[in-house]
Amino acid sequence: MPVSSESRRLPRLRFNLWSAGALIIALAVAAPIFTVLGLAFTDTSDIWTHLYKTVLGLYLERTITLMFGVGIGTLVIGTGTAWLVTMCRFPGSRIFEWALLLPLAVPAYVLAFVVTDQLEYAGTVQSTLRDMFGWTRPQDYWFPEIRSMGGAIVVMTLVLYPYVYLLARSAFLEQSVCVLEVSRTLGKTAWGSFTRIALPLARPAIVVGVTLVLMEVINDFGTVDYFAVQTFTAGIFDVWLNMNSVGGAAQLSSVLLLVVLVLIVTERMARRDRKFHHTSNKYSELPSYRLRGYKATLSFFACALPVLLGFIFPASVLSHYALSFYEETLSADYFSYVINSLTLSASAALLAVVIGLFLAYAVRLSEGPWIKIAARIASIGYAVPGAILAVGVLWPTGALDQSLSWIGGNFGIAVGGVMIGTIVPIVYGYLVRFLALAYGTSEASLGKITPNMDGAARTLGSNPSQTLKRVHFPLMRGSLMTAAILVFVDCMKELPLTIILRPFNFDTLATFVYQYASDELLEESALGALTIVGAGIIPVILLSVTIAKSRPGKL
Amino acid sequence: MSRILNSMGIAAVAVSALLSTSPASASEEVNLYSYRQPFLIEPLLKSFTEDTGIKVNVVFAKKGMLEKIQAAGSNNPADAVLTVDIGRLYGLKQAGVFEPVKSDVLEANIPAHLRDPEGLWFGLTQRSRIVLASKDRVKPGELTSYEDLADPKFRGRICVRSGKHSYNIALIASMIAHHGEGKAKAWLEGVKANLARKPQGNDRAQAKAIYEGVCDVAIANTYYMGKMQTNEKKPEQKQWAESVRVTFLNQGASDRGAHMNVSGAGVLKGAKHKAYAIKLVEWLSEGKAQKIYAEDNFEYPANPKIAVSDIVKSWGDFKADTLSMEAIATRREAATKLVDEVNFNEGPTS
Amino acid sequence: MSDLHLEAISHAFGDNQVLSGVSVNVAAGELVCLLGPSGCGKTTLLRLAAGLEPLQKGQIKINDVLVADGTNSNQMPPEQRGAGLMFQDFALFPHLNVRDNITFGIDAKNKTRRAEWLDHALTSMGLVGYADAYPHTLSGGQQQRVALVRALAPDPRILLLDEPFSGLDVTRRAQIRTETLRLVKQTGVATLMVTHDPEEAMFMADRILVMNEGRVVQDGTPVELYSSPKNAFVAEFFGPVNKIQSTVHSGKVKTPVGVFDADGQKNGTQVDVLVRPEGFRLANADEKPHAMPGDNLGNTSVVLAVVYARPLGRLSHVAFKLSTGQVIETRVPGLFLPSPGDKVSVSVNAHQAHVFASTTILEAR
């Protein structure tokens, strides 16, 4: 049984509806990114010399440290727990399957506040310690500085590991048993099978997960600002707001983009010649290793810790505060915030998944590199800090509005702000930001379907669209659902784009929280924050169920 | 494929039709972009609506407002902007988005040095950036000027929020205006060396730090003191306030006075509800609004006819630095660069 | 009923020239095999016929309709060609059961044909009762049959089989081959099959095209290819051969096992004489080997020493050494097991000996 099949090529379509459509859409989604790049040219003052002489080195060092720390943390926690939960049975493993995803529902800034609130000098933990040990002054004992690089790494790891967990788990679930058993008969122990076969085969998925995580780390501003960690992104905002240079900020963002592009390209080149689809059609129940004794206990705690710190802890603190302070913030408007958040997120999720699928399929059908490049560029919005991306969105939509007004004016129709005054810019912004998730998921999922499947359908009389509908879509349902849920949860939490792009009389739960959180009024923000978390729980559990069901053959 | 396009098209149209809030049209309302949190200005706006029947729609953001205004061009839905410091006001003025307003009411209510000579912006309140000194550990008179903050006797005793925050940038800008870049840089280095910890948190967190014994001296805006002193919901903040003394700096007979900043407003060019916008700004400069600013927000009203609240009064009278807001605003970039050069935000050990 | 014409097909993947001027014709009802080593381009040819690769050079006609011309980028897409293709890895749709897989290519509107065909297919392939099963629960042989039936279901104009039996265990292969051949012949569809197994090709095909490095080396019936190979490559492809080197003198080639006709080679040419193991006739040293029906033994025999002899059931494998030191492998029917060192009488059936000019040993490639 061959482990990997040679590459099969697909029918090539010349310039046609698929390619054309894909290019147009990709360009539309990439427009804000191009805007940012374009803005970079508008600043002629030399901020680089200043930065280079002063803080650039520091920014880079901090950013790299952060990326490294969070990257390793999420990799270890995400992959390790995914393996434990998929391949082993120990007390609580069934629950951990979905519980490990719960931190997805918690916005990073919320966790940051909660952690700081509880762990700082006046917080519960230190106060308790002081009571217990009779210390009275900060000089009496040592406690790690919460607002530091370490704190930032811990918080971001806890919030972001679910991405890696998710993707690793999907990959592990899809393993063909044959491959694992072959590995064992060749003398590998369970640990050996993990490291030499399962892990490498799951590599593309894990890499996608870690890449998403790293991009989140790069573009984050709120959390690092709160933890007083000066990253490259902090520099971007500094140049923008204090040196009044959008162009300068755009320049810095473009550099970030470049770095991310290089990262992605390098990774792709590294796995270019290897193919990862399984060729065995045999799938049986995955064998699970029963763990006992200290191994079981260790596994239990290894899984319990992230859930505890990343979800239970913030959720309980928020609940406590929400109960005490909700009168401050509960009003009729609160329910409109909930509705707004839900509808916005749902629409964006649907749109993102559809577009992501469309692009991924168009790439699959084409042979030339252009569509693929366009799709790549369209999905790099993730790497741009939210507020800068918002500026990137503003210009095309504003220009579109102006054109529409001008056209309307010529016909005597008064066309007001069609885009700017509505939620269209926000949905557009979400799309640009989160397409990477949807496209990446579709791409990975399509990659697991052997091109011969396409060939079979085509020779049986099915054109590309019909094939997508009858063959690919049913096979990808699980992943598409996953992508939709991920985008949904992310949109619920999204802050910077929403703040800047929203129209009048439109607030989401996130902006509601932001009002108070921006002044570090955690207690007042608790109600809104708790709602965001609560709204995320069900999708997250749904997510876990979807993945568990995605094992081929389990139809 | 057509099926997919169809569904997408339908989805997009449905979504925007269902959810698009109609852009504010010609009705009794005014659209406001605010840099101040809604919960802070709600009481004011509610009162305005009661008085005038004009509804106020607010969008709150701390960045991106200017770009939003510029990108929308003639389709800009906002009528006016409310800011929390001179930096934003000045930036908007420089970008040319403000409409000059000629208003007798505003000219009467707002002193000339607190508004733009061309009527592009109007200061509504003032706040001073002062020192909160630990009652226990700092003797009165030990710290009398901003320059003192760099004195080595305060090594390891100072807490402040991020050097890049606009309130601090304004302060540093004023130092540059008064002493020139070279001396200002030396001063900043001195302050950095005196920090008790890495700059973090907001202004109130610094008072908290003094209460906890982490440091002895904090730099904060005046109104936060008022907020802490009257916080019923979180009584621990009262304790923080209790532990510190409000100290106005540079009060000597020939000294320049305490650093001031303004929050203010301006009317945007091409505003669809210009008249209402002007009315709003005028109303904000009038007694009722100014009183709310004074009583509820513990600020110094720009309107000289309105008295400060009792709490504010309890901090004492003080001499204010008459340095023009413009002078501060133009030096903000230089100030920010100084913070980088000195690497202020890394804290005392670096 | 349609036929398939592939004319002067050339194809390259980047710098790699995979096919050079290949022409294949398959008449309706005919089963033609493309036989050759891996990498010789045969699968590519199949994919070009199906329309899964864009044609670069040459022409493809199905039933006299030009479906692809290398000079024109407007080529008929696969779904319109009516070319059924069965993949090496079967490519069954995992989310559909057997019934839905098989009827995938039949229009939903054509319900009666659906039911008809389904019954017929399931019965004739011994899959009755499996209609609702999913592919992953089927054995390899069952999957192959489903894949074949699926390809035939929409009544294709031509049928393309890509190594259809290579994924099956050897023991089942014979039976499945027979069934496949029966079904294909029943439908009468022009079939082009790709394989690297010569025995399979000989069993299934009406005609075989031997390919090597992108070119057709020989095109003929199985008998023709086996008995009259055009060159050493073809001869060697159909089974192991003993290669004896010699030179042509006076129109004859003299070897330690006999003298053979020069077969058109000029005097003085270095030649290889290829003799199949089954072309030897052996007897005890003092006897002359018996001829089998159709043999041409000449009247000569030589006596040679045995190296070893092994029984293979219905054959015996006897190896003996020539005076030159070369070891010759032979296979004879029945049990003939001399001991090492014994002498045997050896004759060669001239029909199973082929003379070709030497290409390998002395020439640098």
Image: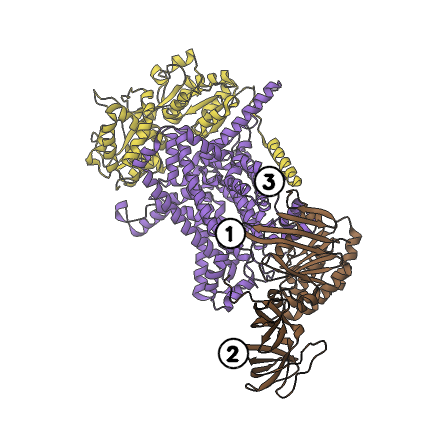
Judge by depth and name the residue closer to the eye, B15 or C130.
C130
Q: Are marks 2 and 1 on the same chain?
A: no
Circles 2 and 1: CB atoms closer than 8 Å: no
Q: Position of residue B191 (x, y in %)?
A: 25, 34
| Helix, strand or loop under label 2 | loop
Q: What's under tag 3, amino acid-wise?
A: Ser
Query: Can I make out residue A503 in this image?
Result: no
How dense is the environment of label 2, judged by Cα within 10 Å: few (below 14), some, or many (20 and up)? few
Q: Colour of chain A?
A: purple
Q: Which mark is residue C19?
A: none
Identify the residue under disc 3.
Answer: A19
Which residue in the structure is indicated by mark 2? C325
Q: Nearer the viewer, residue C360 or A401?
A: C360
Separation (CA) of disc 2 from disc 1? 64 Å
Residue C90 drawn at (x, y percent): 64, 58
Q: Residue furthest bottom?
A: C286
**Separation (CA) of disc 3 from disc 2:** 67 Å
Residue, disc 1: A167
